[in-house]
Amino acid sequence: MHLPNFPVVSRLAPTPSGFLHLGNAINFTLTWLLTRQAGGTLHLRIDDLDRARFRPAYLDNIFRTLEWLGLDYDHGPTGPDDFERYFSQRHFLADYEAVLQAAQQAHPAVFYACRCSRSELARLALPDGRYPGTCQHQPLPLTTPNTAWRAHVPTPTPVHFPDGLQGPVSLRLDESLGDFVVRKKDGAAAYQVASVVDDVSLGTTLIVRGLDLLPSTAAQLWLTQYLPGQESFAATQFAHHGLVLNAAGQKLSKSTQAGEQRGVMDEVGTPQVVYQAVAQLLALPAAAGESLGMLLAGVEAASKAR
């Protein structure tokens, strides 16, 4: 584990599209630990671009889960009403669109309009099983209604970056993600763009994510060179942690929760289960998982022992 030795600004970035599960709680606790150990600044940044799956109960669950875990933050909404009034991504749609328009004008060959879904692109897989991820239809004007914009990822596009938990990371973006959406069919910015713009706005220097988001990290690092004013994102440091799996060996997700489950608080009952999982993830002594304070002490001891 390589703990940060630079000025740390990080963020908790939950989505109110379902009740938060154990994997979310582990990620938030780990982010909090690394930020607090470094004496850094922590933001709460709630990503609510997906308003189709948004529910007030999911938003409320975010604040209740953070309180249950004992995690504080330095900047961000104090509760659901404050979030809706001042912090929702709906208030920043014009900012995202301005970045997209500037990007398209500066790099017209990178972006194209496409009606294909990801599953339709997947059906274009090459005979050897690789995923080209590139639309092979005739390009459409970017002004075509009900049409998404994609960023064209050339073949090959290797992306390399150091990772605080995994060491050096290298992957082929063209094979792992392909041509990804930057502007959705409804005209709103897609996750990869909004996330970069939000992180640059916050001055984020450290992002803690699960291993399942490695392709998204690669996409954002590659994309930032084409987003005017967002180039500083390329200096962001990352720490990708292992995933929590269910009994069937599947990664936990909001969409696979049982109908009666209302998130990690119902799932495990006590925050000590989360602390113990984080201690195991960081290879700390088992006693470090007894409380949040002991977790922090364990991380600080590990830092001094480097």
Image: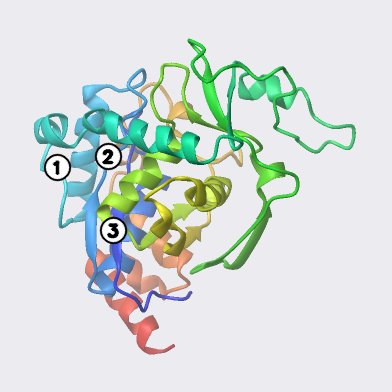
- Dividing the picture into quadrants, the one containing residue 170 is bottom right
Query: Which residue is disc 1 drawn over?
Result: 77
**SS for tag 1?**
loop
Residue at x 72%, y 18% (from the top left corner): 137
Q: Nearer the viewer, mark 1 or mark 3?
A: 3
The amino acid type found where label 1 is placed reads: Pro
Say which label, 2 or 1, has the lower sequence index.
2
- Lateral position of residue 271 relative to residue 166, left or right: left
Circle 2/circle 1 CB separation < 8 Å: yes
**SS for tag 3?**
loop
- Lateral position of residue 265 relative to residue 278, left or right: left
Please identify the residue farthest to the right as the structure is shown: 127
Identify the image's colour scheme: rainbow, by chain, secondary structure or one colour.
rainbow
Residue at x 41%, y 37% (from the top left corner): 102
- Inspect this view and state whether residue 180 appears: yes
Q: Which mark is residue 203?
A: 3
The amino acid type found where label 2 is placed reads: Ile
The amino acid type found where label 3 is placed reads: Gly
